[in-house]
Image (spheres, grey):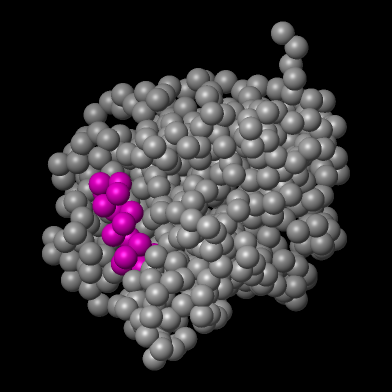
Amino acid sequence: MEDTRVWLKNYPPGVAANIDPDKHPNVLSALREAFTKYSSQVAFHCMGKDITYKELDKLSDKFGAYLLSRGLEKGDKIALMMPNMIQYPIALFGALKAELVIVNTNPLYTATEMEHQFKDAGVKAILICENFAHNLQKIIKNTAIKVVITTSIGECLGTIKGALVNFAVRKIKKMVPKFDIPNSVTFSDAIKNGKNFKLPENCSNSEDVILLQYTGGTTGVAKGAMLTNRNLLANLEQIKMWMSSKLKESEEVSLSPLPCYHIFAFTVNCLALFTNGIKNILIVNPRELDSIVKEFKKHPISVMTGVNTLFNALNNHAKFREVDTSSLKVTIGGGMAVQPHVAREWQKNTGCYLAEGYGMTESSPVACVNPLDSSAKLGTIGIPVPSTELRIVDDSGNVLGVGEAGEIQIKGPQVMKGYYNRPQETDKVFVGDWLLTGDIGMMDENGFFKIVDRKKDMILVSGFNVYPNEIEDLACCHEKVLEAAAIGIADEKSTEKVKLFVVKKDESLTKEELFAHCKEHLTGYKRPKEIEFRKELPKSNVGKILRRKLK
């Protein structure tokens, strides 16, 4: 049978058309192979602290055993809520060893957002950075959470340095609001107690869900994408295959500024690069550009992942332009479109091509990526990764030809099982094995894909999806608001920012009141930056608010 994947002719040398998603029975099998193969090498580095593959293996054993000693069972959900810290991979791998399901949680979530996710997923345990525990205290009684483990930023940095860091964070910067959660234990105590218990043999199979990664999909309220062992194994093999011509096994150093709770960093850095013996440098706060400069000066960084806004900020950071980046071999931008001028400037500054990739939480996430050299095409999202197909389809479901614009659909072993407890929502995004992305794109004669329009209503703020329904629903909870509509408007710093249009129920309503209301219930990037009052909002003949008219 003829292979219709026209893009295969443009695959980099050494990249195969297909990968074997069944090479390992589960993700833990791939991790165990790495623990053994690279035992003496550094796996992660954060704030001056190294942890080797062997140390990580032992500590994650203890953490996993502790979780089971607290009565948790296979398939129970554990939320991991922290910035990039050494504790994250220890907890991640420990929870996988205990056969729990990971629920990655943005630490910047408000109590309202936390409550929705924890209740929807049925979370029973949580590891949370103490900086955010005050929000958990507000809502924990409304959830099924029974096991609470807190951790501090300095907890794994050594006795002296850890104490200094914690003193600065708690006392000087006052970044840890007071909290009191009964029966909570510290991360250190969990590890200490875990050594008294043993982990049973892991029997997780390829179709078991091991990650609930929350996303709005193409609309509305956040839903948990069910990602299986096989989904994640497929994507890590696809990523490793794509980078194989550029990277040498066990010899590279990767900079990881994106948070591990984000699906891009989770799969690329925590899984794919880790299982290739790469040293991952974790950045706690990527907004502190000087911390990134510092790591470039200390380490021969050869791989970097990030989003367009970060690359743009570094391009314009005087200290970064003075850094030696000659060791850099691979730079990949995802999460949002990489702007051509940013890519050109990055290559000029670093000598390394900035390759744009594309994917969704629902595809684990990588589906498409540019070659990592000059054969890439600026302004495109590249070509499908091995064992993956993309197609362009019109509104009637007809497959379109070269140069015709329609919806992008994805098929491959990395595509999710569905949305957790939402069969109707799952049905909406599948046609057979094809995942409907909601993105409008086209393919050229060489199999390179280009996004020509994004999901109709989604707003993209610094690589994060913001869904208008959520903003509008929250605004309408205010007693003085009659109607609301949210759209994205252009913003130099973050690609887009949220603008809210409001019809007042009470004429005394002020913008300041609404800004304060949104600040209380929404994470920073979701909050409206502009508010406009209107007498009425444009509507269709059935009363649906027409956001496109507001745009």
> Relative to 379, is 65 above or below?
above
Q: Residue furthest bottom?
A: 508
Residue 65 image-quadrant placement:
top left
> Relative to 245, is 63 above or below?
below
- Residue at the spot 42% in from the left edge and 40% down from the top edge: 425
- Residue at the spot 44% in from the left edge and 33% down from the top edge: 427
Residue 321 shown left or right of residue 509 in the figure: right
- Residue at the spot 43% in from the left edge and 81% down from the top edge: 504
Give the percent coordinates (x, y) of residue 30: 47, 29
Image quadrant where one finds the N terminus: top right
Give the percent coordinates (x, y) of residue 447: 79, 32
Residue 316 makes an appearance in the image: yes
Residue 164 makes an appearance in the image: no
> Relative to 243, is 115 above or below?
below
> Relative to 184, is 168 above or below?
below
Given residues 546 and 382, the one toward you in this image is 546
Given residues 417 and 71, the one toward you in this image is 417
Query: Does the segment drawn in magenta span residue 57?
Result: no
Residue 441 shown left or right of residue 128 in the figure: right
Which residues lie in the magenta part? 108-123
Q: Could you tell me how many numbered marks the image carries? A: 0
Give the percent coordinates (x, y) of residue 432: 52, 24
**Dominant secondary structure of the magenta stretch?**
helix
Residue 209 image-quadrant placement:
top left
Image quadrant where one finds the C terminus: bottom right
Residue 115 shown left or right of residue 304 in the figure: left
Residue 391 shown left or right of residue 278 in the figure: right
Q: Residue furthest front?
A: 541
- Residue at the spot 16% in from the left edge and 61% down from the top edge: 141
Give the percent coordinates (x, y) of residue 119: 26, 52
